[in-house]
Structure formats: C-alpha cells, structure tokens
Image (spheres, rainbow, N blue to C red):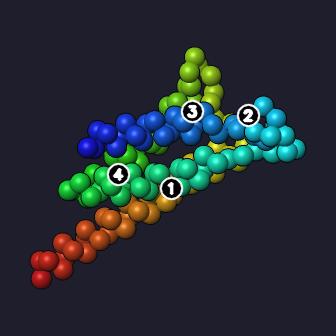
Amino acid sequence: MLVLLSVDAVLLAVLELFFLPLRFDGLVLPRLGDAPFPIVALVAAVTTPWLVSVAAGLGNRKLGMIPLLVWLVTMLVVGVTGPGGDLVLVGDARTLLLLACGAVPAGLVLGGVLGRAARESTTGRR
C-alpha cells in the first residue's frame, strides 16, 4: 500500500508541475486577460496531506513522511531537469505557491500525527 501511495505522490507531482503554467490565454482556458490559473496549488493542498495521513495510518506513523518526501523529490527533480532537460518550474510566484500549498499542509498533518504518537507513547509509559 505504501508503494501505491508513493506512486500516487509521483504522479500527482508530475501532473501538478505540467499544469502549473496553465493560464487564461484562450488556448486551453477561455481568454480572460492572460491571468495565471494555479489550480494545481489547490490540488496539492488537498492531495498531499491526504497521502500523508493515509500512509501514517498504515501502522508505523513515521511512514507518513514517505509520500511527502517522494512528492518533494519528484517536484525538484522533474521541475529542474524536466523532460528533455527543459525547466518545468515557472519563474514566478506560482512555483512558490505550489510548493507551499503541497508541503506546508502535509507537514502540518505529519507533525500532528507524529505529535499524537509521541503523546500516546509518553502517556502509555506512566
């Protein structure tokens, strides 16, 4: 199950990177002043914490960090090297928004899970 969650993290990171440059430019979306449409940040804010919480529920709660680490490594490797050596990450605030919306909520979920585990282990010993 953990392998499946890691594959999901890779696929989500790749899709989020490839749809990051999406704009209201009349090509894919309607023309609305060529404004950026960073919907992938919302997708990352929902899916990455979900992957962490599901992985943490598999037994050892430390396993929750694996999907987050896989997502981050995929974002960095594919974002910088890209297909054919192209740079996939756009050079504006959308990249920071995507990284923040994916990593921060997932990190908060992971911290909550690990904190709960630490609290249960200390109260269980007394």
Marks 1, 4: nearer the viewer: 1
Mark 4 lies on residue:
65
Give the residue drawn at x 46%, y 36%: 11
* Disc ID at residue 79: 3
Mark 2 lies on residue:
28
Contact, mark 1 vs mark 2 (Cβ under 8 Å): no
SS of the residue under disc 1: helix
Marks 4 and 3 sit apart, C-alpha to C-alpha, by 21 Å
Inspect this view and state whether residue 54 appears.
Answer: yes
Which amino acid, by three-letter code, is at mark 2? Answer: Val
Give the residue drawn at x 34%, y 43%: 5
Marks 1 and 3 sit apart, C-alpha to C-alpha, by 20 Å
| Mark 1 or 3, nearer chain start | 1
Contact, mark 1 vs mark 3 (Cβ under 8 Å): no
Which amino acid, by three-letter code, is at mark 1? Answer: Val
Which amino acid, by three-letter code, is at mark 4? Answer: Met
Give the residue drawn at x 53%, y 55%: 45
Residue farthest to the right? 33
Marks 1, 2: nearer the viewer: 2
* Disc ID at residue 46: 1
Marks 2, 3: nearer the viewer: 2
| Mark 4 or 3, nearer chain start | 4
Front one among 121 and 29? 29
SS of the residue under disc 3: helix
Which amino acid, by three-letter code, is at mark 3? Answer: Gly
